[in-house]
Amino acid sequence: MLSEKEKRFNESMPLGKLLGGILKKYFGALSKKMEHLGVDRHFSTLVAIDNAKQKCTQQYLSDLLDFDKVSMVRILDYLVAKKMITRTVNPQDRREHLIQLTLKAEKIMPAIHHGIKEMNLKALKGLNKNDQELFYSCLATIFNNIEDLPGNKVDIKLKKK
Amino acid sequence: MLSEKEKRFNESMPLGKLLGGILKKYFGALSKKMEHLGVDRHFSTLVAIDNAKQKCTQQYLSDLLDFDKVSMVRILDYLVAKKMITRTVNPQDRREHLIQLTLKAEKIMPAIHHGIKEMNLKALKGLNKNDQELFYSCLATIFNNIEDLPGNKVDIKLKKK
DNA sequence: GTTAACAGTTTACAATGTTAACTATTATTT
DNA sequence: AAATAATAGTTAACATTGTAAACTGTTAAC
């Protein structure tokens, strides 16, 4: 027989706790794994730029990656300094900056994707194909359910080195 | 026909991106919703203390919540200042501090749980009971798969006000 | 043509992880 | 029993990054 407290806990906590725990470990381990590529924890920004379906402005990236624009500027400054991206003014709209990967970055993209894929394999171990598909579709549903909540931007902060 | 780039992306990114996006919105919206309770973003620390099955030391909490011990000290300092918890030296082992909720905190726990439950309902809308159960069991599997990776502590940082 | 909106930048500040040094207490070794 | 090691927690200095506000330059709207 569960106490009132336990019932409360079981009804309310697991989602946030599990998601949080997974994400912390997931990004922490990935950052560590990709240390040698020299892009700090910003590999996912490179992936987003690499995969941009439309013109890749800073606005687009900060929306996609859920960073505020000030942080986005800093992250892109960092990636420019690392010679991983270029920032060029869009001639069609001179307010915008277009972000592109450099050749140097292009060269490490396969390693980044490989690292992510490997981590996903490890994370999903023991789940059969059906489970995995349902899991992803649940995630997508939840993502949409939550998307337009009046939430705030959040930063996932990782150990530096 | 997918390009090489698109194939790479589809194989590697969705897990991290979906998890990250969900978590940011989820905690952001919850923090906002609980602003009026006056515990900043640290409601989940209160839940952990409330639900502790064993003696609740700072070590126990920082392991459970994945905060490093320095941050844990700061968070508990904050909660003590807010008169939400008490810190007492454990007479059995005078190195340890036992953390307990105050009456003031006990009073707001139902509201906190209600807020979390409401958010979960919103997040899981459209998923039937079976899907939800499978989803939770997938999360638990992933959590275990990832748990002992050599990852780093991560902070979920939220907008202040 | 004037005003408003937008993209991006800069600055100052606040929150929090990291590292290292520290205190007090308990456990272990010899 | 005394010396040493390990543990729990604290403090201080520093780095990263979100927030807010003020700013520039450019484009859109009226």
Image: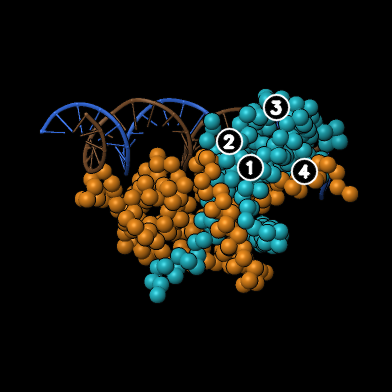
Chain colours: A cyan, B orange, C brown, D blue
Residue at horizontal 71 percent and vertical 62 percent from the top: A130
| Residue indicated by mark 2 | A32
Q: Identity of the amino acid at label 3?
A: Val
Labels 1 and 3 share a subunit: yes
Dot 4, how many residues are within 10 Å of its Cα: few (below 14), some (14-19), or many (20+)?
some
Dot 2, how many residues are within 10 Å of its Cα: few (below 14), some (14-19), or many (20+)?
some
| Residue indicated by mark 1 | A68
| Residue indicated by mark 3 | A80
User: Residue B11 placed where, x, y %?
Assistant: 74, 47
Labels 4 and 1 share a subunit: no
Dot 3, how many residues are within 10 Å of its Cα: few (below 14), some (14-19), or many (20+)?
some
In whole angstroms, how far apart are the C-alphas of marks 1 and 3?
Answer: 18 Å
In whole angstroms, how far apart are the C-alphas of marks 3 and 4?
Answer: 24 Å
Callout 4: chain: B
Callout 2: chain: A
Front one among C5 and A28? A28
Q: Return the mark for residue B8.
A: 4
Dot 1, how many residues are within 10 Å of its Cα: few (below 14), some (14-19), or many (20+)?
some
**Is A99 left or right of A17, judged from the image as shown?**
right
Callout 3: chain: A
Residue at horizontal 63 percent and vertical 52 percent from the top: A125
Front one among B69 and A53? B69
